[in-house]
Image (spheres, rainbow, N blue to C red):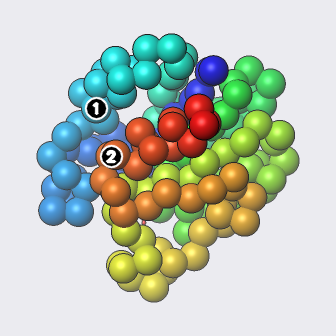
Amino acid sequence: MKLLIINGPNLNLLGKREPGIYGNTDFQSYFIRLKEKFPETELDYFQSNIEGELIDKLQQADGSFDGVILNAAAYTHTSVGIGDAVKAISVPVVEVHISNVASREEFRHTSFISPNARGVIFGFGLEGYDLAVRSFLS
Ligand code: DQA
């Protein structure tokens, strides 16, 4: 099983950014532990702050990965382009958010990704990525 985690804008700042919401752990340290937890799963990670790069990566994942775990961060709520990319590809995408977006500002309640995602996981902190990996294994 080959899975790609794609993180969007500002998620390179995890650990430093609003720790009350996103926690104190940076993604690189978390990703090392995640790979140790799932030694039989090939896990790749990509982060970009640039919308077009996220779209390119989604298109490239089609045919080369069994699944994508996507936290498009703020672009979730704004990007028709990323939503269209998720719709256009045939590799299944699980949408993840670290925070409970439903309990936050109204603009975070909209997702251009959810309609075409296999499923959505939010509100469990970084653990949400573990759950997303597991969803592909079950
Ligand atoms: C986020 C939630 C988004 O609303 C926000 O813009 C982010 C992170 C999350 O993981 O909780 O940057 O996707």
Q: Is residue 52 visible?
A: no
Query: Left or right of 58: which side holds 77?
Result: left
- Which residue is found at the position 43% from the left and 22% from the top? 38
Secondary structure beneath dot 2 equals: loop
Is the shortest distance between ligand 1 and the CB of mark 2 under 8 Å? no
The percent position of residue 92, horizontal first and vertical second, equals 72, 42
Specify the quadrant that holds the N terminus. Answer: top right
Question: Neighbour class for label 2 at 10 Å: few (<14), some, many (≥20)?
Answer: many
Which residue: 43% across, 14% down? 39
Q: Which residue is located at x 26 percent, y 45 percent?
A: 14
Would you name the residue on which mark 2 appears?
126
Residue drawn 60% across the image and 48% down it:
94
Circle 1 packing at 10 Å, graded few (<14), some (14-19), many (20+), is few
| Ligand 1 quadrant assignment | bottom left
Mark 1 — residue? Answer: 30
Q: Is residue 100 visible?
A: yes
Spatial separation of the CA atoms under disc 2 and disc 1: 8 Å
Q: Amino acid at mark 1?
A: Tyr
What is the number of callouts on the image? 2
Q: Quadrant of the C terminus?
A: top right
Foreground pick, 56 / 103:
103
Give the number of the disc on residue 88.
Answer: none
Contact, CB < 8 Å: mark 2 with mark 1?
yes
Query: Where is residue 136 shown, x and y percent of the image?
Result: 61, 36
Disc 2 residue type (three-letter): Leu
Residue 41 or residue 138, whichever sits in front: 138
**Dot 1 lies on which element?**
helix
Residue 121: x and y in percent read 49, 57
